[in-house]
Image (cartoon, rainbow, N blue to C red):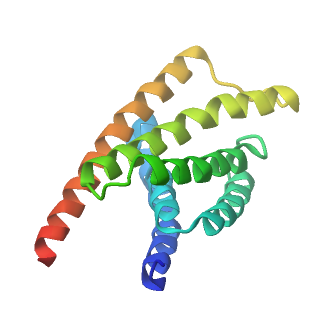
């Protein structure tokens, strides 16, 4: 059972990450770090399965109403992310090492960033809203996602390793 303080910390981290992401976006341009996605991945990592699914529904509906993507795209992405988190927690991270957790988090960040754009294009095609990315923008999204899905877990693994050494 996960302590309530960790759950509260994870929810606060997601709520704080939203204005942080939106304030960094004009400064960093399209290469801004996926702070919201990272916070959601860590929120999902802390929660049990059904709480993760419920959080995915709530966050998906919130992001679908706030952002310009076709409605339902974030809801589907967060549901896939919740299921993939469960799969990775059960298979890949049976060991409690920093490397496997970092690899899992990087894979989840990459999957969520890559999955949202084709899904949004598909939903945009189906509802005839015309939402879609050009090939250049799609390549840019791919390499940006790859960059941040490698860099963020390395930074976070280093911080968590330093924190665990400090606590001992």
Q: What residue is rendered at 55% in x and 22% in y? A: 138
In the rendered image, the quadrant that contains the C terminus is bottom left
- Where 164 sits versus 62, above or below? below
Q: Position of residue 9 (x, y in %)?
A: 44, 76
Question: Quick one: 98 or 132, which is closer to the camera?
Answer: 98
Measured as percent of width and height from the top left, residue 129 is found at 84, 31
Q: Nearer the viewer, residue 72 or 89?
A: 89
Q: Residue 72, image x and y in percent?
A: 77, 46
98 or 162, which lies in front?
98
In the rendered image, the residue lying farthest to the bottom is 4
70 displayed left or right of 77: right
| Looking at the image, residue 133 lies above or below residue 17 | above
97 left or right of 78 in image: left
Can you see residue 157? yes
* Residue that sits furthest to the top in the current view: 135
In the picture provided, is 132 more to the left or to the right than 98?
Answer: right
The answer to whether residue 23 is above or below residue 139 is: below
- Across the whole image, how many numbered discs are drawn on residues? 0
Task: Examine the rendered structure and indicate whether residue 11 appears above or below residue 128.
Answer: below
Which residue: 45% across, 69% down? 13
Q: Which residue does the image show at 44% across and 60% down from the upper left?
A: 42
At horizontal 53% and vertical 48% (from top left) the residue drawn is: 87
- On the image, which quarter does residue 52 sit in? bottom right
Residue that protrudes farthest toward the right in the picture: 127
Left/right placement of residue 116 relative to residue 34 reads right
Residue 33 visible to the viewer: no
Q: Nearer the viewer, residue 94 or 100?
A: 94
Whole-percent x, y for residue 114 in the image: 54, 33
């Amino acid at each position: 059972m996960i302590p309530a303080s960790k759950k509260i910390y994870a929810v606060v981290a997601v709520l704080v990450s939203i204005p942080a992401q939106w304030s960094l976006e004009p400064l960093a341009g399209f290469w801004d770090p996926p702070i919201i996605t990272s916070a959601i991945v860590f929120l999902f990592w802390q929660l049990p399965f059904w709480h993760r699914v419920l959080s995915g529904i709530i966050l998906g509906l919130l992001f679908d109403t706030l952002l310009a993507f076709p409605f339902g795209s974030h809801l589907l992405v967060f549901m896939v992310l919740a299921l993939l988190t469960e799969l990775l927690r059960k298979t890949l991270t049976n060991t409690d090492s920093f490397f496997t957790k970092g690899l899992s988090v990087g894979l989840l960040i990459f999957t969520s960033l890559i999955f949202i754009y084709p899904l949004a294009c598909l939903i945009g095609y189906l509802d005839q809203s015309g939402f879609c990315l050009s090939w250049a923008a799609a390549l840019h999204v791919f390499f940006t996602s790859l960059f941040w899905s490698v860099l963020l877990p390395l930074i976070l693994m280093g911080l968590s390793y330093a924190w665990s050494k400090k606590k001992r």
